[in-house]
Image (spheres, rainbow, N blue to C red):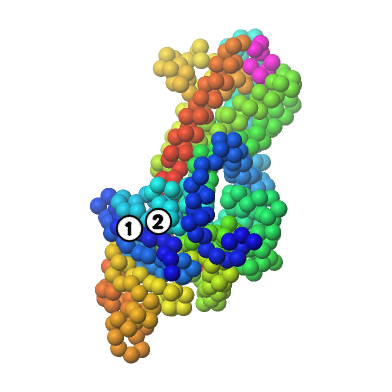
Amino acid sequence: MTLQEQGVPHGELDSAALLRPIGIFSASLRFVQKTLVIAELEARKLRHDPTELLTRAVQPALWLLVFGQVFASIRAIPTGDLSYLDYMAPGILAQSVLFISIFSGITVIWERDLGIVHKLLVSPTPRTALVLGKALSAGVRALSQAIIVYILSALLGVNINWNPLALLGVLLAVILGSAIFSTFSMIIACLVKTRERFMGIGQLLTMPLFFASNAIYPITIMPEWLKVLALINPLSYLVNVLRTLMLGQPVTPLLLVNLVVLFAVTAVLIAIGARLYPRLAV
Amino acid sequence: MTPILETHNLVRQFDDLVAVKNLNITVEAGTVFGLLGPNGAGKSTAIKMLTTLLPPTAGDAIIAGLSITRHAAQIRRLIGYVPQMLSADGTLTGYENLLIMAKLYDLPGQEREARVREALAFMGLDGAADQLVRTYSGGMIRRLEIAQSMLHRPAVLFLDEPTVGLDPIARRAVWEHVQQLGREFGTTIFLTTHMMEEADNLCDHIVIMHLGEEVASGTPESLKASIGGDEVTLDDVFIHYSGSSLESGGSYRDTARTRRTARRVG
Ligand SMILES: Nc1ncnc2c1ncn2[C@@H]1O[C@H](COP(=O)(O)OP(=O)(O)OP(=O)(O)O)[C@@H](O)[C@H]1O
Ligand SMILES: [Mg+2]
C-alpha cells in the first residue's frame, strides 16, 4: 500500500518526486497522449450529437450544384485545360474546411463561461496539447465535409484522382487546413472573450478569406491588390494542395512548398494559441 | 500539525483594483479550511492563484512544499479544483466526464476504470453514469464535479462555493461527501462560501475576507467568542467583520455570474 492509499496526505516526499525531471521520451509520449485525449473529448461530443455534420453538408452541395453548374455552362472563368467543375470542386472542399473551422472558437468561449476551461487548465495537461487537441478535433469534423464533397463531386462527374497516396495527402491537407482556421478562430476567441464580439469578427473575416483566395477563380485574373491578399491567405495554399491531389494534376516541387507553408502556419498558430489559451481563465 | 498550504503576502491586482491584498494564510494538513467573505471579497481570485490559473501580482504560496509561481506544472498534480460555475460537460455522460479527467491525470488503464467506477459509487451516481450530464440536477452535477476532482487523489481540494444554488437536501449531500473525503483520503479541503451555516458545519478554521483583505481568522467557535454575547451565530461574525454594509463589495459582474450558476442549477 502506498501512503496515498492509506489516506495519508502527501508529504514532502511526493513533492520532491514531482520535481525530478522526466525524460524527453516520456514527456513526448505524454504530450501525444494528452493531445489525443482532448481530441477524443471532442469526438465523443460529436458522437452524442452529429446533427451539425449533416446540416453542414448543405452549403457545399449548393455551391457545387448551383454556382458550379451555372459558371461551368457560361465558361466565364479561364481554368486552363480543366473544366470549371473540376477546377472548382477542390476549392469548395477548401471552402467547407474554412467554414466549418472558422467559428469553432466560439466553443472555448462557452467552455470559459461554464468553467470547463478552468478545469482543463488546472489539470496537468500541457497548454500546447490542449490547443493541438482542439485543432485535431476540428480536423475530424472537416474530414466529414471532405467525404461529402467527394461524394457530390463523384456524382457530378468531377475527374477525381482515387490514388490512395493522393487521398492520404488530401486527408493531411484537410486536417492542416482546419487546424489553421480553427486555431486562428480560437486565438480570436481568447482575445475578445465574449460571444457577441467573436461572432462579429467571425462574420467579418469569413467571406474575405474565401474570396481573397483561388478557391473558385484563379489568382491570375485578380486585380493586383487582391493578388497580394490571396498570396498571404493560407486558404490559397490549401486550395493548391487539394487541386493538385484531388484531380491528379502533375506533382511538382510546388506541392511541397505549399505543404511546408501549411505546416509552418499551423505551428505558429498553435504556439500563439498555447500562449493565449490560459488567459481564458482570468 | 504541519501546514500543507501557506501564502506569503499574496497580491492580485486587476488594473486599479486590488482584488487580493497581502494575504497570509496557513492551512493545516487534513483539515477543512474556509475562506469567507461577501461578493467581490476576492475569494475566487485567491483560489485561482492557488490553483495556478492566475499568476499573482506579488507574493507567493507554498503547497506541499512547492511554489505556485515556480512549480505550477508540478502543483497541478497535487491539487483538485471545482470552480464556482457548474463546470461538468453537459454534452457528455457522467462516465465520460470522469473518464476524460482520469486520462488527463495519467491514471493508468486498469486503475482508471476502477477509480471511475469507485468515484461514481462514492458520489451516488452509478445509476446515472450513462446519462448525458445535461439531464442531471444541480446537486448531481456538483457531486459529479467533486468526483472528477478527486480521481487523482489530490492532497488539497479547492471548492469554490460548492453549494451555491443547491437546495437544502442537495447541499447536505455535498457536505456529507466533502466530510467523507477528508476522513477517507486525508484530503485537505479549501473551500469558499458565504453561507455561514456551511462554514460552521464543515470548517476547522475560517478566514474572513473583505474587499481583498483578511479581517478575521480562527475556529468557528473562537470567532463567535471574539464578538462576545450569547447565541452569537457566524452570521453575526460575518456581518461584524465585513462591516454592516453587505452590499459594499461585488460588482454587477459577480452577481451576474452567481445568478447564472444558480439558474443552471435551478
Ligand atoms: N478578470 C478580472 N478582471 C477584472 N476584475 C476582476 C476579475 N476577476 C475578478 N475581478 C474583481 O475582483 C474582485 C474580487 O472578485 P472575486 O471573484 O475574487 O470575488 P469573490 O469573493 O469570489 O466574490 P463572489 O462571492 O461574488 O464569487 C471583484 O471586485 C471582481 O469584480
Ligand atoms: Mg467567487
- Amino acid carrying label 2: it is Ile
Residue B161 in view, yes or no: no
Q: Is residue B219 above or below residue A247?
A: below
Please give left or right for residue A147 compared with residue B1 in the image.
right
Quadrant of residue A93 within the rendered picture: top right
Q: Earlier in the sequence, mark 1 or mark 2?
A: 1
Which residue is label 1 attached to? B8
Farthest residue, direction bottom: B230
Please name the residue shown 45% across and 43% down the image.
A277
Q: Nearer the viewer, residue B229 or B73?
A: B73
Amino acid at dot 1: His
Q: Nearer the viewer, residue B20 or B130?
A: B20
Q: Residues within 10 Å of mark 1 (few under 14, many from 20)?
A: some
- The residue singled out by tag 2 in the image is B62
Residues B262 and B17: in front is: B17
SS type, badge 2 = strand
Q: Chain of mark 2?
A: B
Residue B228 lies left or right of residue A89; in this view the side is left
Q: Which residues are magenta?
A: A244-251
Q: Position of residue B8 (x, y in %)?
A: 32, 58
Asked whether the residues under the numbered discs 1 and 2 touch, taking CB atoms below 8 Å apart as contact, a structural biologist would say yes
